Image (spheres, grey):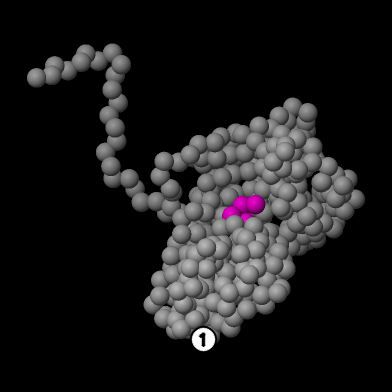
């Protein structure tokens, strides 16, 4: 089963506007423990670093990895390095969660030269003796720190429950596979389109399956206003989550709520370096994407995830055949590299020069002077 997101941290919750309720936080780091027992010291270190443990045998490792869908660390026994098919298992595990780090964990007596050389050849990142607490904690510190530094912070915004998931669930699943943090902000409870409690439960189930954080707004369904109050709510969420990437409705959409959310996000996201617009079922023929994301490896998971919106099952756009056909259609832009894709309009795509932090310190460097184009050049000695 996927890693379950927990409660939203106080640091983020206190920064949210009154009109946006936190439902759950993104899933924390997960470790796949293959064929070994994590003793007291190892288990304590993993717990201290926030890892959720998922134990499996060597034979069932790939199935367990596929069930998880995303994990940050794999612990393997030294004896696996002697197996002829170790390279194939490691390659398959990395294909499921490409950002995951692989550690061989065992007593120093088993970490022989042959084991180390074989491990390095098949793609092991590090070797550690679980009895060496300093080495183990240092290794885990590096893994957590490296993952945090590499990860994008993704915020996907939709007007109603299921909007985000229809438009870009495959891309969000790919973000999770790469170790990125994902938040979903739904601006209304979708009361016009169904029972509010049922839709909230379905949104929670899909976010949990995705491993994403979930925030729910309380704007009126079918009457969302793109004005200052909506902008301020979105600005507050952006300040709390500090996203590096935003996904939102396209402006080329027949639904008034979708257009309103797009408009408000454009005003609220001025400092976010990357903003992409996804396709909704109500998008007009003017939707002209110029960015395509291959979702071959997660298409089945997207179909399953959208199937969780049971209260909307009569909607034709949630039928598996429609989901697959749409992804197949857009993949023509990536052929022959992909068979299934999601499509986006590039609203903004800038690469930040400096990696941002959740609470950046004020920049004390002097601001470059403004030089008049009409100023006379200064005399030089």
Q: Position of residue 297 (x, y in %)?
A: 71, 52
Q: Is residue 101 magenta?
A: no
Q: Residue at x 32, y 45 (%)?
A: 363
Q: Main secondary structure of the magenta part?
A: helix
Lateral position of residue 92 relative to residue 119, left or right? right
Q: Residue at x 66, y 32 (%)?
A: 290
Question: Looking at the rendering, in which quadrant would you find the C terminus?
Answer: top left
Q: Position of residue 359 (x, y in %)?
A: 42, 54
Task: Kindly give the residue lying farthest to the bottom in the view shown.
Answer: 40
Query: What residue is shown with label 1?
Result: 40
Could you tell me which secondary element the residue under label 1 belongs to? helix
Lateral position of residue 123 relative to residue 193, left or right? left
Residue 218 makes an appearance in the image: no
Lateral position of residue 282 relative to residue 355, left or right? right
Question: Looking at the rendering, in which quadrant would you find the N terminus?
Answer: bottom right
Task: Kindly give the residue lying farthest to the right in the view shown.
Answer: 314
Q: Position of residue 331 (x, y in %)?
A: 74, 39
Q: Position of residue 325 (x, y in %)?
A: 83, 42
Q: Which residues are magenta?
A: 174-178
Residue nearest the viewer, comparing 370 with 319:
319
Q: Quadrant of residue 62?
A: bottom right
Is 377 drawn above or below residue 76 in the view shown? above
């Amino acid at each position: 089963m996927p890693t379950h997101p927990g409660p939203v941290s106080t640091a983020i919750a206190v920064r949210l506007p009154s009109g946006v309720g936190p439902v759950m936080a993104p899933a924390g780091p997960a470790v796949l423990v293959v064929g070994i027992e994590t003793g007291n010291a190892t288990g304590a270190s993993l717990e201290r670093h926030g890892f959720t443990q998922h134990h499996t045998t060597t034979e069932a490792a790939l199935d367990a990895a596929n069930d998880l869908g995303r994990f940050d660390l794999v612990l393997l026994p030294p004896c696996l390095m002697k197996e002829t098919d170790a390279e194939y298992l490691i390659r398959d595990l990395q294909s499921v969660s490409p950002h995951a780090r692989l550690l061989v964990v065992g007593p120093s007596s088993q970490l022989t030269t042959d084991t180390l050389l074989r491990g390095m050849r098949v793609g092991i990142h590090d070797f550690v003796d679980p009895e060496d607490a300093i080495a183990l904690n240092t290794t885990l510190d590096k893994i957590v720190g490296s993952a945090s530094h590499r990860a994008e912070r993704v915020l996907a915004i939709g007007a109603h429950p299921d909007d985000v998931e229809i438009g870009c669930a495959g891309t969000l699943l790919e973000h999770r596979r790469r170790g990125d943090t994902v938040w979903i902000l739904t601006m209304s409870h979708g009361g016009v389109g169904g029972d509010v409690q049922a839709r909230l439960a379905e949104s929670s189930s899909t976010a949990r399956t995705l491993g994403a954080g979930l925030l729910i707004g309380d704007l009126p369904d079918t009457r969302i206003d793109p004005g200052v109050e909506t902008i301020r709510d979105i600005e507050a969420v952006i300040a709390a989550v500090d996203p590096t990437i935003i996904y939102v409705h396209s402006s080329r959409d027949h639904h008034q709520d979708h257009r309103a959310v797009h408009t408000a996000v454009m005003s609220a996201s001025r400092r976010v370096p990357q903003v992409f617009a996804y396709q909704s079922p109500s998008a007009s023929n003017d939707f002209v994407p110029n960015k395509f994301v291959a979702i071959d490896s997660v298409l089945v998971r997207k179909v399953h995830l959208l199937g969780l919106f049971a209260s909307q099952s009569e909607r034709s756009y949630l039928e598996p055949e429609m989901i697959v056909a749409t992804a197949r259609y857009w993949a023509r832009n990536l052929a022959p590299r992909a068979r299934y894709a999601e499509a986006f309009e590039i609203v903004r795509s800038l690469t930040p020069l400096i990696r941002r932090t959740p609470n950046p310190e004020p920049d004390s460097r002097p601001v470059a002077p403004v030089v008049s184009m009409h100023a006379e050049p200064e005399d030089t000695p």
